[in-house]
Amino acid sequence: MRSLPEILRRRPQARVLVIGGDGVSYGAPPAGGGSWKDVMRKEIGDAADWSRVHFLGRVPYPQFTSILALSRAHIYLTYPFVLSWSMLEAMACGCVVIGSRTAPVEEVIRDGDNGLLVDFFSPQQIAECAVQVLAEPEAFAMVRARARQSVVECYDLRSVCLPAQLAMLERARNGDYSVTVA
């Protein structure tokens, strides 16, 4: 959110879509109550053109993937916690993911190859990266393609994840409780 004023200033035609609920799922709520959206809107104030920022709330899955398919960039920040399915979906839809340089994201994104990594605590770096992706979409065509390829090769349910889970269950059934990481 702190990167919004700079992104909107430098990309005057950009629209920002924020998807997700206002509730707290993993962290603590704001100290003074309310939502983090309210806290950030108050902090940023008039520095951002809020008419170009659209808070969509939770959207049905087909609508979510349609939005991703049309997006030029998907900013995904997590301070190390868990990797969300939404980042993998964004990659599978061919988005350029601008992700935080944090442990769970670094497990999937190779900076400059299948996505871009930024400092979680640097709104300036996040904005600079987003502006570059928005300004030169053709320059990131291979990043988009490799993002999708990475997800298909490493996380596809039918060809990768389900066979691995079934093999793990079969090993456990046979008394082998060792973990194999591919």
Image: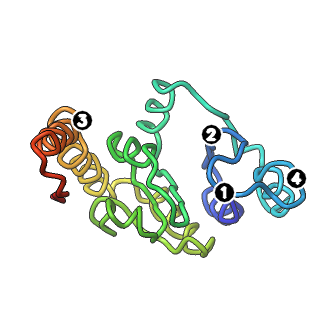
Residue at 55% in and 74% down: 125
> What mark, if any, has residue 15 been given in the picture?
none
Are circles 1 and 2 on residues that touch, CB within 8 Å?
Answer: no
Front of the two marks 1 and 2? 1
The residue under label 1 is which amino acid type? Gly
**Label 4: which residue?**
33
> What mark, if any, has residue 27 been given in the picture?
1
Image height of 77 relative to 51, above or below: below
x, y (%) of residue 106?
36, 67
x, y (%) of residue 45?
86, 59
**Label 2: which residue?**
20
The residue under label 2 is which amino acid type? Gly
**Label 3: which residue?**
157
Q: Secondary structure at mark 2?
A: loop
Camera-nearest residue between 127 and 156:
156
Q: Secondary structure at mark 1?
A: loop
Estimate the spatial distance between the alpha carbons at disc 4 and disc 2, rounded to whole Å.
Answer: 19 Å
* For residue 118, side relative to residue 123 (left or right): left
Estimate the spatial distance between the alpha carbons at disc 1 and disc 4, rounded to whole Å.
Answer: 13 Å
Label 1 or label 3, whichever comes before in sequence order = 1
Q: How is the image coloured?
A: rainbow
**Local crowd size for mark 1, using a 10 Å CA cut-off: few (<14), some (14–19), many (≥20):** few
* For residue 106, side relative to residue 39 (left or right): left
Q: Residue furthest right?
A: 32
Are circles 4 and 3 on residues that touch, CB within 8 Å?
Answer: no
The residue under label 4 is which amino acid type? Gly
